[in-house]
Each structure stands twice: as C-alpha cells, then as structure tokens.
Image (tube, rainbow, N blue to C red):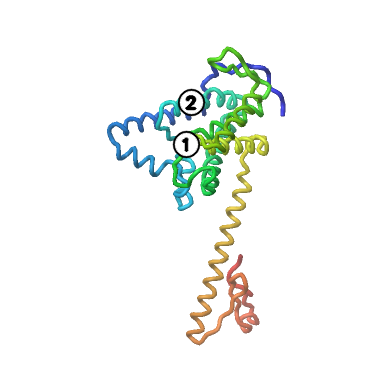
Amino acid sequence: MARSREMTLSLPPFTRAVTWLLAINTAVFLLLELFGMTLIDVARWVRDYLALEPLAVVHGAIWQLVTYSFLHFEFWHWFGNMLGIWMFGSAFEGAWGTRRFLELYAFGVIGAALTTTALSFSHVLGNPTIPTVGASGGVFAILIAFGMVFGENEILLIPFPFSLKAKYFVAILIVVTLAFAIQGGGNVAYVAHLGGLFFGYIYVKFVPRGRVPRMGISERYFGLRNQYYRWKRRRAARKFEVYMRKHNRTVEFDEQGNYIPPEEEKKNGGSKSGWVN
C-alpha cells in the first residue's frame, strides 16, 4: 500500500458524501429532539422500531441493521460521531473517492450491527434486549481505514498542542475500546465500535479497489433462487402424480421434476421432457 504524503488533519474540507452524512444525521437528531419535546410517542416509536435490538433483528427487523446508525439521542453522542465523520472521513473520501468511502462506511455500520447482534446472545459482551443507536460503527471503520491508508500521517490532536502518527492513534484507540468492551463500558456500545474496527479492516485489506464483490453476491442469489424454483417444480410434480393416480392415470417425472411422456409418445416423435431446466 502506497505511503501518502505528510499532512496535518486539522480542518478538512466538507466532501460530498461526508456532507450528506452530516446533513442526514443532523436532521434526524434535530427531529428527534423536537419529537422528544412535543410528540413523545413518536420519539418512543422511533427508539423501539428503528434502534438496533438484536432480539428484534433475529425475528425479522433487519432494517435495524442500518436505521440505528442515524439515531442519536444525546448531543455529545451526535457531536462526537459527526466530528469523526468530518475529520477523518473527508480525508479518506478525498483520497479514495465518494463511492469507496460510502462502501467503507456501510461496511462499518452493518458490520458493527452484525457483531453486536451476534455477541449479544453470549450475554458476555452485550444483551439481546438492549437497543443500540449511533453512527459509531461507521466512524470506527473510517478510523481504522485512515490508520491503515494514512498510517504515517501526523494527526493534530485538537485541542492538545501536539500531534501523533495515525497508526499509533488508531492502535491506542483499539486497545482502549477493547478494554472497555471487556470490562463493560456503561451505556456505550463498545462492541459496536469493535465491529466497526474489524469490518473497516476487512474492507481495506480484502477489497483494495473499493469494490464490493456484487457479482459474487448476485450469482449466489440467483443460484439460491434457481434451487428454490427447482424444489417447487419437483414438489408440484409429486402432487400432480398423486392427483393423477387418484383418477386411475399414471404420469412420471424425472428427478428434476420434468415430465416423462409414455413410450408410445416417444415413438411418435414426442420429446423426452416437457419442462426444461
């Protein structure tokens, strides 16, 4: 991986995707603040149905794997995540492009949600009935990606009057996060932080061009879909055989559910099978 030029991370520009994320998260945060003062039932509904609750996810609420990342119910929680997206995300987006940055962010958000859901059922790192909110999974994916891609860059640690190389900053962050996750960090979802770090690492390490392997996913999807349709066809063939036997007629189908015509039809030039795979 090529080493980037030296730079100081102080006041980066507002790149396209970073601006979108800041705007969406801020709008949702302000709306929730308004609902909390005027429409308490709406705010409660948002928390109940859009926050990440592992028990609800395994029962079908898969939208929560994404929606939780746009919810922030405390000012400093929202401010810290937005600062992280801006300070580190804009540098990454400027170097790798908008699409790659959004893919990385999505990897972190969904990966953190999956990690939180999986580990919560162990009752060691989390609880499946406790909801999780916030964009920290995506932020931590950005942080570790920044440390891997711009490891030699000097980060100006505002408001402290000194700087630190990005790779050391991220290493310290990982150790602290892991320690809090093991000890239990109060109401902070450190498990989600670890999930974001892990999936951010996976993205940079194994998707170096910033391309999610969509073709492989599509092929697996269509393969499963075809298997399902073949199963339905075999099932329909068996039902039809039973129906015809009840009417004193015999029909045959092969292992794929294709109709096998009688011998006399074959002699008259009929095809071997009526359905094709």
Residue 277 horizontal/vertical position (percent): 61, 65
Whether 215 is drawn above or below 156: the answer is below
Asked whether, in this view, residue 84 is left or right of residue 25, the answer is: right
- Label 2 sits on what residue type? Gly
Whether 125 is drawn above or below 31: the answer is below
Q: Give the CA distance from mark 1 to mark 2.
A: 13 Å
Residue at 67% in and 39% down: 206
The residue furthest top is 161
The residue furthest front is 183
In front of the other: 145 or 276: 145
Mark 1 or 2, closer to the camera: 2
- Label 1 sits on what residue type? Ser
For residue 98, what is the image quadrant? top right
How many numbered marks are there?
A: 2
Q: In the image, which disc is placed on residue 140?
A: none
Residue at the disc numbered 1: 69
Residue at 46% in and 27% down: 22
Classify mark 1: residues with Cα within 10 Å, few (<14), some (14-19) or many (20+): many
Whether 89 is drawn above or below 219: the answer is above
Residue at 50% in and 24% down: 83
Residue at the disc numbered 2: 80
For residue 211, what is the image quadrant? top right
Residue 250 horizontal/vertical position (percent): 55, 84
